[in-house]
């Protein structure tokens, strides 16, 4: 498993795709610095930056780039056949790749979230945001890794999911919030930070239980889907 994780990390960080992870975190920090140094109250700018830029845009987009890349690139170029030909249980392939996706996504999101949170309200909010964004990284990464095995167009489907479901419906239609990864992450960040700058729209219990259900469900789906691949890289 460690070998698979190392190969995945080296391949992911060595691709141009990794450069796509940098603009959004830098932009989020830059946008927060402007009102902070102009003396604007955090009550006016923290919510739009943290929620609209952070939980709605940065976190899912970074997870999409990374999550669809750890297996999707190998499926596209055919090198997945080399891994499938090894006598490895399929979960020993999926799990380390998923862990790499989670680690890279969480690290990419943690820095801007902590900095913006600290600028808005101090370290407690920064740490709470790191906790919430890490939960979001686990959930989004699991979904997008599974999606890369289900579809030949995982990035396109992922964008539709992020924009339509997470970006529009979960914020406009209250009934869909109980099925929103964004809302789970936001609620957990709210609980961990105890800040009035955040406002989770689902209960903490729902956020925790649904996070576990989504993670296990999509992980099992990814393992089962990879198990259906033949050595040619096609589903049987």
Image (cartoon, grey):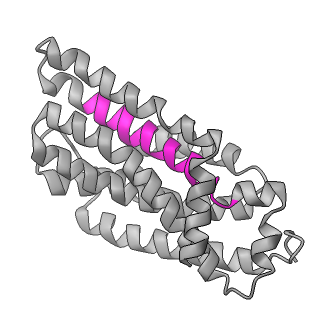
Q: If the image is split into quadrants, where does the N terminus sit?
A: bottom right
Residue 181, quarter of picture: bottom left
- Magenta region includes residue 53: yes
Q: Nearer the viewer, residue 123 or 192?
A: 123
The x and y percentages for residue 79 are 80, 63
Residue 47, quarter of picture: top left
Q: If the image is split into quadrants, where does the C terminus sit?
A: bottom right
Considering only vertical position in the picture, is 149 above or below 45? below
Bounds of the magenta segment? 47-71
The residue drawn where x is 70% and y is 51% is: 154
Residue 96, quarter of picture: bottom right
The x and y percentages for residue 4 are 61, 72
The x and y percentages for residue 227 are 74, 81
Q: Is residue 200 visible?
A: no
Question: Residue lying furthest top in this view?
Answer: 38
The x and y percentages for residue 118 are 15, 37
Q: Nearer the viewer, residue 75 or 213?
A: 75
- Magenta region includes residue 147: no
**Left or right for 220, reference 139:** right
**Left or right for 77, reference 131:** right
Considering only vertical position in the picture, is 42 above or below 173? above
Q: Is residue 217 visible?
A: yes
The residue drawn where x is 40% and y is 73% is: 212
Considering only vertical position in the picture, is 137 above or below 111? below
Instruction: Name the main secondary structure of what is drawn in magenta.
Output: helix
């Amino acid at each position: 498993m460690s070998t698979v994780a190392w190969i995945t990390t080296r391949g992911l960080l060595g691709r141009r795709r990794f450069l796509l992870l940098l603009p959004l975190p830098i932009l989020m920090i830059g946008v927060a610095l402007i009102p902070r140094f102009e003396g604007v109250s955090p009550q006016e700018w923290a919510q739009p930056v943290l929620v609209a830029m952070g939980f709605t845009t940065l976190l899912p987009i970074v997870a999409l780039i990374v999550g669809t890349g750890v297996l999707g690139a190998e499926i596209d170029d055919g090198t997945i056949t080399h891994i499938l030909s090894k006598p490895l249980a399929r979960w020993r392939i999926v799990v380390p790749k998923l862990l790499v996706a989670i680690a890279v996504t969480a690290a990419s999101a943690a820095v801007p979230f902590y900095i913006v949170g600290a600028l808005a309200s101090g370290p407690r909010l920064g740490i709470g945001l790191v906790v919430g964004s890490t939960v979001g990284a686990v959930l989004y990464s699991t979904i997008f890794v599974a999606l890369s095995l289900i579809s030949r167009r995982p990035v396109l489907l992922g964008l539709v999911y992020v924009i339509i479901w997470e970006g529009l419906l979960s914020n406009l239609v209250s009934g869909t919030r109980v099925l929103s990864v964004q809302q789970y992450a936001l609620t957990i960040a709210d609980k961990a930070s105890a800040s009035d700058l955040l406002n989770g729209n689902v209960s903490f219990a729902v956020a925790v239980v649904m996070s576990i259900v989504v993670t296990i469900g999509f992980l099992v789906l990814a393992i089962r889907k990879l198990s259906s691949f033949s050595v040619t890289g096609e589903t049987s």
